[in-house]
Amino acid sequence: MREGLPSGGRDNSRMCLLLRSAVAGLAVAALLLLLLSWPTSDSDSELRLAMAFVMAPFPLSMVAAWSARLRYWPVVGLVAPFAMLAVFLLQPNYGSWIPHKTLAFGMLIGVPAVVGFMLTALLCAKLARMVARSAGEGAKGAEGTEGAEDTAQGGVRG
């Protein structure tokens, strides 16, 4: 073991997962803010920009989850936009807290993206651990039942 590194690998991997998912969410938020700053000339281009803004989180999330090397990146990329939407609907109005309008608007887009990615990545990691644990217990349980059937039939397990 190298000097200066924490010995708890499980906590360290969780923090690494949180950091990578936060960076991926930050990248998605920055790209969405860049998309919203796209100049529009008429109402038709505004409608196309609104449709692009609604659809953009899906491919952006897939690419961000893949580039952040999240373990289950396809699932995170597909579920993260829905988590972003949920956080967007639940978040407070930042305009009353922050007097600068541009910063408040940036937080309105950025906070749901970062928190949505972090929640989705943690949820996927938790579900993966639960599935692995239940699969491990199922294999142990199957071995135990097999041995009990052999003994009940009078056979010797060898």
Image: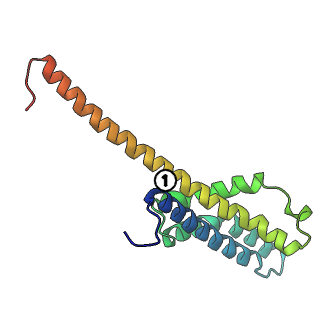
Residue 63, percent from left and from top: 53, 71
140 sits to left or right of 73:
left
Q: Quadrant of the C terminus?
A: top left
Q: Amino acid at mark 1?
A: Ala
Q: Position of residue 10 (x, y in %)?
A: 45, 56
Which residue is painted at 52% across and 63% down in the image?
17
Residue 28, given in percent of the width and then of the height, sits at 64, 70
Q: In screen coordinates, is 152 left or right of 76?
A: left
- Taking the spot 19% from the left edge, 28% from the top edge, the residue there is 146
Q: Is residue 11 above or below residue 27?
A: above
The residue at 70%/52% (across/down) is: 86
Tell me which corner region of the image, top left, top right, bottom left or bottom right, holds residue 110. bottom right
* Residue at the extreme front of the image, as rendered: 3
- Judge whether residue 79 can be spotted in this image: no
Q: Quadrant of the N terminus?
A: bottom left
Q: Which of the pair 89/15 is nearer the observer?
A: 15
Local crowd size for mark 1, using a 10 Å CA cut-off: few (<14), some (14–19), many (≥20): some
Q: Is the residue 21 above or below the residue 27 in the image?
A: above
Which residue is rendered at x = 60% and y = 59% of the image?
118
On the image, numbered disc 1 is attached to which residue? 125
* Element on which disc 1 rests: helix
